[in-house]
Amino acid sequence: MINRKVLFLIMLGLFWITQPAYCAYTDIIGHDSLSCSSLAQTLDRLYGLEHLTRIDDYDTELGIYPTDQFWSCITGTEKLTITVRSKDADFTHEMGLLPGIETTEFQAVTRPLSSHDGIYRFPRTYTFIPDSNLNEPFRFGLNIMDQPGTIWSSAPVDNRDGIDHMVTYQINGTNSYVIAWEDLSADGSWCDFDGDYNDLIVQVNGAQPVIPIPEPIPLILFASGGIFLFYRPGRRAIITS
Ligand SMILES: [Ca+2]
Ligand SMILES: [Ca+2]
Ligand SMILES: [Ca+2]
C-alpha cells in the first residue's frame, strides 16, 4: 500500500515530466564594466525591460513554435527596416538577410557599422524593399567585415561554430522586434567568445518569426510508395506565427 506522501511525490514527478519543454533560450552572459553595458542594461535603457518579451531561440518540439531562426516579411508591408540602436563591439558589422532557409548568399541591408558607440544618440534606419516573394522565409545575417568569410546566421545550424549568435525580443503589443547579436566566434579561431550578445542591437519592423515546415507531399507518392525516393527534407514552406 503506497502511503499518501509517496503518492503525492509520484504525482508531482509525473506532472513535472509531462510538462511541455517546447522552447529554449540561448544563454546570455551579462557583464558589467566601466566601458560596456550588459544586454539587459542596454535594453532597459532603450525600451524598458517590462515592455519586451523574449522570443524562443529553439523549438524542442521541432516545428511547432516559431523561433527567431527564420523570418518572413509581414504580409501587406512594403518594406523591411532595420534601425541600429546600439553597438558594443570593435569589429565592423554589416547586417542583412540570407534569403531562403539554406542559401549562403548574403544581402546587406545596413551600411558598414564601424564605431563602438554604445547606444546611438541618433539611431540610423536602413530600408530593404522585398521582391515579390513576400512569403518566402529568410534568415537574418551579420557580416563580420574584419573576419572575411564570417557571416553569422540567425539559424545556428548555418554557423561554423554551431552556436546561436542572435537573440530576439518582441516589443509588447507591436509587430516590432529587437535583435541582439553576438559577433565573436565560439570555435576559438579568433578572440575569446564572451556571449554577451550586446555587440549590435537593432530594431526590425516589417518582418516576423515563422516556422519552416516540410512542403506537403503529394498523396500519390504515399500511394506509390515513392516518398522514399522523392522526399527532399531541405525543401520547405512556411506558416506564419
Ligand atoms: Ca536565437
Ligand atoms: Ca560579444
Ligand atoms: Ca560586446
Image (cartoon, rainbow, N blue to C red):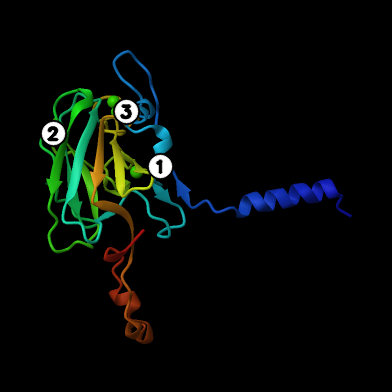
Q: Nearer the viewer, residue 27 or 149?
A: 27
Classify 10 Å Cα crowding around label 2: few (below 14), some (14-19), many (20 and above). some
User: Which residue has dot 2 on it?
Assistant: 145
Q: Can you say whether 206 is above or below 44 in the image?
A: below
Specify whether tag 3 is near ligand 2 (CB below 8 Å). Answer: yes
Whether residue 27 is visible: no
N-term-proximal mark, 3 vs 1? 1
| Residue matched to label 1 | 54
Displayed quadrant of residue 29: top left
Location of mark 3 (residue): 193
Residue at 20%, 38% in the rendered image: 83
Q: Is residue 172 found left or right of 72 in the rendered image?
A: right
> Where residue 227 appears, x then y in whole percent?
34, 77
3 or 1: mark nearer the eye:
1
Residue 236 at x, y percent in the picture: 29, 65
Q: Quadrant of ligand 1?
A: top left
Helix, strand or loop under label 3: loop
Counting from the top left corner in percent of width and height, residue 229 is at 30, 76
Instruction: Inspect the image, locate mark 2, and give the three-letter code of the amino acid beneath it.
Output: Met
